[in-house]
Amino acid sequence: MKAYQIVKDLWEASYPENIGFVEMTQFFKKATNAQKKEMEKLCKAGDWDAYKALIKKVVGVQLQ
């Protein structure tokens, strides 16, 4: 059980400017086509504040 928690903690590592890979995969499972297009636009523009807001809206997770 202890090893599992260590791996889980590493997998869920959070730090400033983390793009949130796990959250991104969850996003693409839940998002509408319009939200996916918006995400593509935000990534191309490098608008990370809007990216994080869209992740929060769709997935419910606040990235740092």
Image: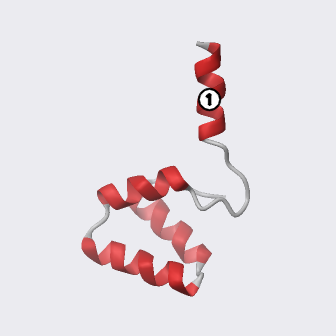
Considering depth in this image, is 2 or 58 the residue closer to the camera? 2
**Image height check: is 27 above or below 47?**
above
Image side of residue 45 versus residue 17, left or right: left
The residue at the point 55 percent across, 87 percent down is 45
Image side of residue 51 versus residue 6, left or right: left
**Image height check: is 63 above or below 10?**
below
- Residue 61 in sight from this viewpoint: no
**Image height check: is 25 above or below 37?**
above
Q: Quadrant of residue 8?
A: top right
- Residue 7 at x, y percent in the picture: 62, 29
- Residue 11 at x, y percent in the picture: 60, 39
**Image height check: is 22 above or below 33?**
above
Q: Quadrant of residue 62?
A: bottom right
**Secondary structure type for disc 1:** helix
Considering depth in this image, is 57 or 38 the residue closer to the camera? 38
Residue at label 1? Answer: 7
Considering depth in this image, is 7 or 55 the residue closer to the camera? 7
Residue farthest along the bottom direction in this orientation: 45
The residue at the point 46 percent across, 59 percent down is 24
* Quarter of the image with the N terminus in it: top right
Q: Could you classify mark 1 by the number of other residues whose Cα lies within 10 Å: few (under 14), some (14-19), or many (20 or more)?
A: few
- Residue 29 at x, y percent in the picture: 31, 55
Please name the colour scheme applied to the rendered image.
secondary structure
The residue at the point 65 percent across, 59 percent down is 18
Query: How many numbered circles are shown?
Result: 1
The residue at the point 49 percent across, 50 percent down is 22
Image side of residue 2 versus residue 30, left or right: right
